[in-house]
Image (cartoon, rainbow, N blue to C red):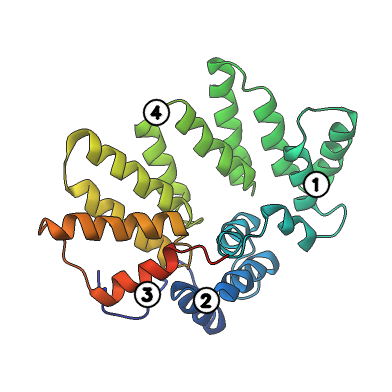
Amino acid sequence: MDLDSPNVEIKTRAVDQRVQNLIQQARQGDVEAYNSLALCYRDGDGVEKSWLNMICMYATYSQKTGGDIEDVVELFDEGHPFRLLFEIMDSPSFNEEVEAKLERLKQSAPAEAKAIDAAKRAFTMDEATVAMNIFREAEDEGSELAVIFQAIYYDEAKDKTGQEECLTRIAEKYPFFNLLLGELYVMKYGECEDFSYIHKAIDCYYKADAYGMLIPKYANALWGMYDYFGQKGMLEYDEQEVERLKVLAKRTY
């Protein structure tokens, strides 16, 4: 890992130069770059269109500006599949109005509606297992909500092996999940003090950072690792890199 380099190349997926520039600006803490990247993911402008990656970028922007994730909804017109999806998931119950929206979603984004239908039946472990199979099917059909449901399932089931496998797989397409995978490795280190897990965690954090998705919580965690283990002589780091992490760790509002 070359901490002295000001740029981190994205190797897993092709993006155009303008997006590369925005990512490097985001890595230096440029708040507006987060918002611009969110719009790129929304529109598929220079990157593969993805509302999940859009939310991840906008969440970082919100943490820096004090905005609300609900502001993302305003980026979409009434009746847009993402807006319907948000309104359905934000509802406290599946009333008639929500069911009507779900029917509309089935017409415009059937894979997302399929994931919601599966989630509705996942009330027991047996049903949850069936639902997981449906989530994988929905994911293969293009559902991004199914990706979230799978990550939630393994977390709530306390299945760390399944969680690690799931996060490793989905992080290839949705870099934000590298942060959750890194957090899992930190927890594993706490259980057995195998220092290789710290190296794995750091690697995961930088994979997210390569896309400008190192949100304040994890920038602070990475900075803390360098500080704690650096004082023990177990990690080497560059002072300039630590200063960058301190900037990323701050909420500016």
| Mark 4 element type | loop
- 216 relative to 142, above or below: below
Residue that numbered label 1 is attached to: 84
Mark positioned earlier in the residue sequence (2 or 1): 2
Q: Which mark is residue 159?
A: 4
From this viewpoint, which residue is outermost toward the front? 253
The relative height of residue 47 versus residue 110 in the rendered view (above or below) is: below
In terms of depth relative to the viewer, which is nearer, 156 or 64? 64
Residue 107's quadrant in the figure? top right
Q: How far apart in space, not on screen, are marks 2 and 1 (Cα)?
A: 31 Å
Q: Of the residues under marks 3 and 4, which one precedes in the sequence?
A: 3
The residue sitting at the left extreme is: 233
Q: Are marks 1 and 3 in contact (CB under 8 Å)?
A: no
The answer to which quarter of the image holds residue 139 is top right
Label 4 amino acid?
Answer: Asp
Three-letter amino acid code at the position of disc 2:
Asp
- Residue contact between numbered discs 2 and 1, judged by CB atoms under 8 Å: no
Label located before the other in sequence (4 or 1): 1
Q: Which residue is mark 2?
A: 30
Query: Could you tell me if the residues under marks 4 and 1 are in contact, i.e. CB atoms within 8 Å?
Result: no
First along the sequence among labels 4 and 2: 2
Where does the image place residue 214, in percent across and percent down from the top left? 44, 62
Q: Nearer the viewer, residue 30 or 49?
A: 30
Q: CA distance from mark 4 to mark 2?
A: 37 Å
- Please name whichever residue, 124 or 214, is drawn nearer the observer in this view of the structure: 214
Distance from disc 1 to disc 3, alpha carbons, whole Å, reads: 36 Å
User: Given the image, on which type of amino acid does mark 1 rest?
Assistant: Leu
Q: What numbered label is drawn on residue 168?
A: none
Mark in the foreground, 2 or 1: 2
